[in-house]
Amino acid sequence: MRLYGLVLIASASLLGACGGGEKGGNTTDTAAATAAPQPSAGASTAAAAPAAGGAAMAAPATGKTVEVKMLGDDKGYRFDPANITVKAGDAIKFINVSGGPHNVAFDDATTAADAKAQLDANMPGTHMGPLSGPLLSAPNEAYTISFANVKPGTYDIHCTPHLAMGMKGKVTVQ
């Protein structure tokens, strides 16, 4: 019971810290509001790699979009599916279905240093922190992350408010 109290306090603190920010606009799909226009056929879709020590530029998705449900119910807190495989250039749309607020965050300790800048750049809108998307509190609220220009590999993800309850997954970029 004490753990639930601590999680509730931590969640309330996160919600308070995330207050304010941008006003107006559609928050149903954060990525849709900030997505760059798609290039015309035949145009190069590769963004320039950042110089050593430089910042990465956001790269729009050029492939398919995979949907992942964010759930909290009698079966526990989870991503569905928890193990996602995408190709570089695809996107993942995380949808808050139940048990929110949820977010998606990449585990800093297991994310390759040379992939962090691009992943963070491809996470649109207001962040809770580096490699950590915003809290989604409304039902069907969504957050889309592009995996364009992201180095192939396996990336551990979690929901920050529900990490202690085992809400984890893996994204494999091919």
Image: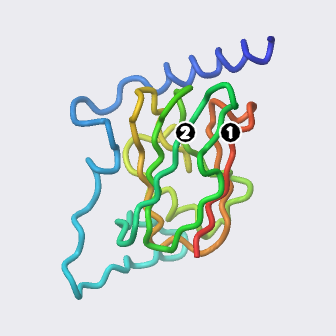
Q: Which amino acid does label 1 sit on?
A: Met
- Give the residue drawn at x 50%, y 24%: 17
The part of the image, by quadrant, that contains residue 122 is: bottom left
User: Quick check: 100 left or right of 22?
Assistant: right
Q: Is mark 1 on a helix, strand or loop?
A: loop
* Residue position for label 2: 70
The quadrant of the picture occupied by the N terminus is top right
User: Quick check: 155 left or right of 47?
Assistant: right
* Residue position for label 1: 167
Residue 170 screen position, x and y as percent: 67, 57
Q: Nearer the viewer, residue 26 or 82?
A: 82
Q: Which of 142 and 118 is in front in this view?
A: 142
The part of the image, by quadrant, that contains residue 132 is: top right
Q: Which amino acid does label 2 sit on?
A: Met
Residue 105 screen position, x and y as percent: 59, 46
For the rendered model, the colour scheme is rainbow
Q: Which of 116 and 63 is in front in this view?
A: 63
Name which of mark 2 and mark 1 comes first in the sequence.
2
Asked if the residue at tag 1 contacts the one at tag 2, i.e. Cβ–Cβ closer than 8 Å, the answer is yes
User: Quick check: 138 left or right of 40?
Assistant: right
Gap in Å between the C-alphas at discs 2 and 1? 9 Å
Residue 81 screen position, x and y as percent: 60, 51
